[in-house]
Image (cartoon, helix red, strand yellow):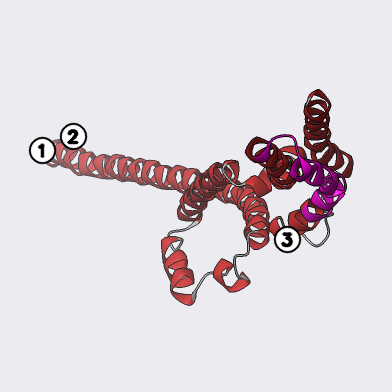
Amino acid sequence: MGPSATVAGPVRQRDAAPAAAEPSAGWAEYLAAARQLDGVRRSAAAAAGEQARSAEAAREELTVVRTGLASQQERLRELGVPAISLVPSPPELSEAARSMAGGPAAVLAALRAARGRAEAADAALAARRRFRPGSWPARPRNLLVYGPFALVVPLIQLAVYVATGVGPATVAALICGLPMPAVAFVAGWIGIGRLFRVAPSERLDRTVRFGALVCLVPAVLATAGLLLALLAG
């Protein structure tokens, strides 16, 4: 071997080192790109899964909101609210569309907010119904009508007796009061129909037997008391 061969050996070794380093650097870049793409894929899959879950939850929430609003609208119509007032206006529809432009998550948030407002409105309606006799059970509600009519004549009879004592006026008031329970019942029956309203598909419960009893008891007690007073006088 001559000097030229000895020099060529180190030269080939120096040329082979960069050639070996270049594949190693390319492989590292490939691995980095692959890891980056895998991260993007995982993020996209997670985002898609989150959107799918949000979309499913939004569909369930929409069903609940629709059911609640339908029931609420029916109650409001029974209270006399005009149908036009229960329909959203164009500006309200535009505002709702803008609030849901961010995808399924935004739609779900808007539906949950709407459900919260609907539940708050239901609570307000329930609180108002507690102070409205029309929403009470039939007997307590009808007692507010039958009761005053039933007490008018007995109170007049007692007032005549207190004012005149035992005499013709008391006797006349007693006789005139005999048919008054029937008159009080008829007046109460009509008054209940005028004061309390129900849906067209429902029947107003006038509690006929209870009303007749309410109208009869004060008259019987007043008549018995006046008869005892007349007999004792």
Q: Residue 1 carries which label?
A: 2
Give percent across and percent down for residue 111.
52, 52
In screen coordinates, is 222 left or right of 83?
right
What residue would you read off at disc 3?
194
User: Which class describes the residues within 10 Å of circle 3: few (<14), some (14-19), or many (20+)?
Assistant: few
Q: For the magenta stretch, what is the residue range?
A: 164-187
Front residue of 49/106: it is 106
Q: Residue 3 carries which label?
A: 1
Q: In this view, does 204 lie above or below 127?
A: below
Q: Can residue 139 be seen in this view?
A: yes
* Kind of residue at badge 3: Arg
* Kind of residue at badge 2: Met
Front residue of 122/17: it is 122
Q: In which quarter of the image is the C terminus?
A: top right
Foreground mark, 3 or 1, reads 3
Give percent across and percent down for residue 174.
81, 42
* Kind of residue at badge 1: Pro
User: Which class describes the residues within 10 Å of circle 2: few (<14), some (14-19), or many (20+)?
Assistant: few
Q: Is mark 3 on a helix, strand or loop?
A: helix
